[in-house]
Amino acid sequence: MSELKYKRIVLKLSGEALAGEKGFGINPPVIKKIAEEIKDVYNQGIQIAVVVGGGNMWRGEAGAEMGMERSQADYIGMLSTVMNGLALQDNLETAGVPTRLQTSIEMKQIAEPYIRRKAVRHLEKGRIVIFSGGTGNPYFSTDTAAVLRAAEIDADAILMAKNGTDGIYSADPNKDKNAVKFDKLTQKQILDKGLNVMDSTASSLSMDNDIPLVVFNLNEPGNIKRVVEGQNIGTIVEG
Ligand code: GTP
């Protein structure tokens, strides 16, 4: 078994990652594949918490742009992360991995409420903990939730799984063919270069708490494992 770089991680899965090519909803074969990937990493003995996004169903910001009251639109987004959490839990458990799903907004019939100490205990007992519901507050992204939960549970790193993008670039590689990929960056470099990695709330929280962040391509099979083994894929943001 290879030496592991991280012992406890927060894996941020965007909602789009669960949608596959259609870009909308939950795609069962896609989510099954992701669950198998997570299982491979879990089998290496690493503690895994997953923060799920909800953009495959609803984006609060987009709802607000269409005239909805922003908080109301964000609550719909939070509910979509719970749906994704349930789907991921189902797939992980079908794959034989014990999990606990927690929600930042209480809906006890569906999942446990988020309790930090319980989440940590679950991780210590070898359960994957899925955090859904974002931070439980409107105006915050699930990237912010990932950083917040990582700080709370004292994770060694945040693994920011991207759909098709293999790291942080100097410009949008889909629009600028001169865009170059960074292997390593500091938080300050991200700010100085004006790179768009996470929203500013998530970025400043991650900077203040000094949690390493790895941005990598989820679509390449085996990549989650490569990151926890410390292989040089994607972009690592440290310091
Ligand atoms: P330990 O106490 O460490 O053994 O953890 P545990 O999660 O196995 O114990 P618990 O008895 O709290 O939970 C048993 C099952 O019930 C688990 O699948 C939990 O996810 C689930 N569960 C616990 N609390 C809640 C809750 O408030 N709502 C829902 N829906 N499920 C819950």
Image (cartoon, grey):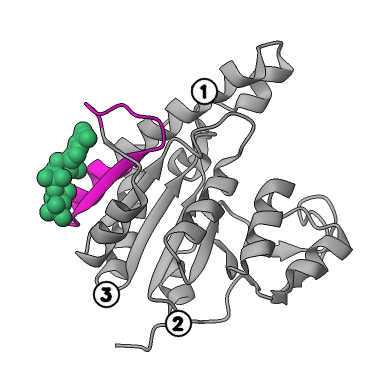
Kindly give the residue lying farthest to the top in the view shown: 67
Tag 3: amino acid: Gly
| Mark count | 3
**Up/down of 177 relative to 13, above or below:** below
Is 95 inside the magenta-drawn segment? yes
Pair 3/1: label in front: 1
Identified by mark 1, the residue type is Tyr
Choose top left, top right, bottom left or bottom right for residue 153.
Answer: bottom left
In depth, the one of 71 and 158 nearer the eye is: 71
Q: In this view, does 35 lie above or below 209?
A: above
Q: The residue tagged with tag 2: helix, strand or loop?
A: loop
Q: Can residue 30 be seen in this view?
A: no
First of labels 2, 3 by sequence position: 2
* Residue 171 seen in this snapshot: yes
Residue occupying the point 68% across, 51% down? 198
Q: In which quarter of the image is ligand 1?
A: top left
Residue 133, given in percent of the width and then of the height, sits at 44, 35
The residue identified by callout 3 is 45
Residue 75 is labelled as: 1
* Residue plotted at (67% across, 24% down): 62
Instruction: Please report the bounds of the magenta region as a residue range.
Output: 88-110
Q: Where is residue 136 in the image (x, y as percent from the top left)?
A: 49, 34
Which residue, given by chain and number where applicable, does mark 2 sit on?
Answer: 5
Up the image or down, 70 lies above or below 33; here it is: above
The x and y percentages for residue 4 are 39, 83
User: Label 1's element?
Assistant: helix
Q: In this view, does 218 lie to the left or right of 106?
A: right
- Give the structural element (helix, strand or loop) at label 3: loop
Question: Sequence-wise, which precedes: disc 1 or disc 2?
Answer: 2
Mark 1 vs mark 2, CA separation in Å: 36 Å
